[in-house]
Image (spheres, rainbow, N blue to C red):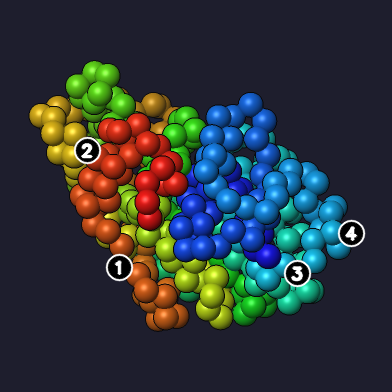
Amino acid sequence: MLVVTGGAGFIGSAFIAWLNARGESDILLVDSLGTSVKWKNLVGLKYRDFVHKAQFLPNLSASKYPGIRAIVHLGACSTTTETDGDYLIANNYQYTRALAEYALEKGIRFIYASSGATYGARERDFSDDDQTTLSLRPINRYGYSKQLFDEVAIQHGWTQHITGIKFFNVYGPNEYHKGEMASVVFKAFHQIRTHGSVRLFRSYRSEFGDGEQKRDFVYVKDCVAALAELLEKPVYGIFNMGSGTARSWNDLATAVFAAMDKEKKIEYIPMPDELVHSYQYFTEAKMEKLQAAGIRWEPMPLEEGITDYVKNYLLPGQLRLQDRPL
């Protein structure tokens, strides 16, 4: 049996849909739904059982789930603007550590989600080697809660037996429930459909034009394909998961307009005061470590990924990966 935490969330539900399409359904799905509409991500998925995240750890300790072959831990608070530090530490650090210690004790494969947010204000050398990871200084509580476990995993030698994934700017189907945390691809699509234009932040640095700030955008289909391969291979350590190529917000917006067959119209708006001096202008994941470990990594170019997302999911109103054959 495979355990997927965060199985109703963006990447988690897309991962289960990917596995289902390849005949895997012996899955224990762990999450909490609350009043979120993410329950809709469960429709059409095939899995053995659903367990609330608060019940999962006690049940695990009581040996109620025999035969676990792997735990893919994608569940966490992913709101980068969350201000409750205790909540973040409990969800993103302590919960992850408890699962990792259990998996290590029982000899169970363990893969967990870290984040590109651990790089903080860094704008060069996005290396995922251990020495760089230990030197990182996140700039928000969310990033710190992810960084803390990465550091502990390295310092305890756990990364010789478990696998961490630093997700960069992921976009694609199954993200519709994320609100402000949804990708700019998703937001741009709806801005264009409603207003005919896209709003991007102005630049406050002379070396970057308006909308020329750059991010590493990666399609969720590429991410879940790599996760599925990692599940079957003895690959351990902490790895970046981005496209490996920084692209501008202007590039992203242009691709969305093209996929919608609309004339490009971009409006540059002032950045909130609290972001002006802490805004990150460039991210680009180094992907050599993952490739050297033997994982196939040929991500879709930004234009190709956005075209697939817009034409095959957003325009037809099919917002989930499982809505189309894979």
Which of discs 4 and 3 lies nearer the camera? The answer is 3
Q: Where is residue 302 in the image (x, y as percent from the top left)?
A: 25, 52
Residue denoted by label 3: 67
Q: Is residue 230 left or right of residue 198?
A: right
Inspect the image, locate mark 1, and give the three-letter code of the amino acid beneath it: Glu
Q: How far apart are marks 2 and 3 (CA)?
A: 45 Å
Distance from Cα at disc 4 to Cα at disc 3? 14 Å
Say which amino acid is labelled 3.
Gly
The spot of residue 168 in percent (x, y) is 42, 54
The x, y position of residue 303, in whole percent, is 20, 49
Query: Which residue is label 1 attached to?
Result: 298
Q: Earlier in the sequence, mark 4 or mark 3?
A: 4
Q: What residue type is labelled 2?
A: Val
Q: Mark 2 points at which residue?
A: 256
Secondary element at image label 4: loop
| Secondary element type, mark 2 | helix
Comes first in the chain, label 4 or label 1: 4
Disc 4 and disc 3 in contact, CB within 8 angstroms: no
Asked if residue 278 can be seen in this view, the reply is: no
Q: Earlier in the sequence, mark 3 or mark 1?
A: 3
The answer to which of 201 and 172 lies nearer the viewer is 172
